Amino acid sequence: GGSPPFRAPLRRGFFVDAALDNRAMIRLLAGLGNPGPEYQATRHNAGFWFVDEAAHKLGATLVPERGYSGLAARVNRPDGPLWLLEPMTFMNLSGKSVAALARFFKIAPDEILIAHDELDLLPGQARLKLGGSAAGHNGLKDIEAQLGSAGFWRLRLGIGHPGVKAEVVDYVLRKPRPDERDAIEKGIELSLAALEFMLAGEMERAMMKIHAKPPRPKPEPRVAAAVPPALDEDPPKGS
């Protein structure tokens, strides 16, 4: 056989650069969450919300696939099939589902995009990144363990943080307030606008779209300036 492809780690981050340059297309888009109606509207299911919306946008219908322990849909695209997946294993066993599908279709880690809830971002924020730590997210941890690699793409959907570590478990398994839910939906909408870039592997363009700061509201005219300065001063002594 021929010699293996040359992959010298020239510098730290070289493989990340290589992945960006080679434009690995996304062949598996998975959203994380817990199955069952009682979990459907909880913060931990933001990944499911994203894949539901992506399926709708792509005209696909997720159906139970026992072989992959999840709901899945195959979308035939010009560059080959794309799989959408929602593991039905419960969050901490998500890797069982993701790895089963990835192995069967020989999908490499950098061809996988995982949409998940992110405590370290505010509701409405979203960030795209390749690799990195699972940061305590049990779904990501299991996917890393089952794939034997952390080198997959993540779409981090902000859900906010309760502020106290001890409250995280309760927090992610509760429904967000209506205003938070609206903000999370906006983050999903923003990310969906970059879906075609993500699927094509044009991640820098996707990031520019997703990470763009919203336009700042115009400052209100300062009414305070109209207050006569005398009101701020102490009254003269003896009055």
Image (cartoon, rainbow, N blue to C red):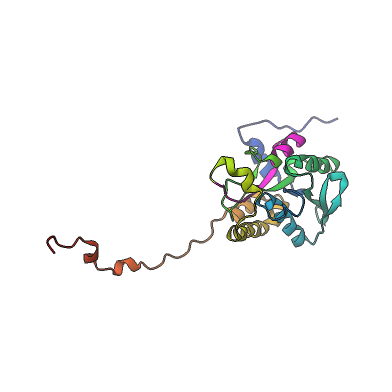
The percent coordinates of residue 32 (x first, y second) are 72, 48
Q: Residue at x 28, y 68 (%)?
A: 227
Foreground residue among 107 and 120:
120
Evaluate whether residue 236 shows in this view. yes
Foreground residue among 55 and 111:
55
The percent coordinates of residue 144 (x first, y second) are 72, 37
Q: Residue at x 48, y 61 (%)?
A: 216
Magenta-span inclusion, residue 151: yes
Magenta-span inclusion, residue 150: yes
| 217, above or below 98, in the image | below
Q: Residue at x 65, y 54 (%)?
A: 175
The percent coordinates of residue 182 (x first, y second) are 61, 61
Q: Quadrant of the C terminus?
A: bottom left
| 44, above or below 218, in the image | above
Q: Quadrant of the N terminus?
A: top right
| 94, above or below 215, in the image | above
Q: Is residue 104 left or right of residue 90?
A: right
Evaluate whether residue 21 shows in this view. no
The residue positioned farthest toward the front in the image shown = 238
| Region rendered in magenta | 140-162
The residue positioned farthest toward the left in the image shown = 238
Q: Is residue 153 left or right of residue 124?
A: right
Residue 92 lies in quadrant: top right
Q: Residue at x 83, y 44 (%)?
A: 101
The percent coordinates of residue 63 (x first, y second) are 84, 55
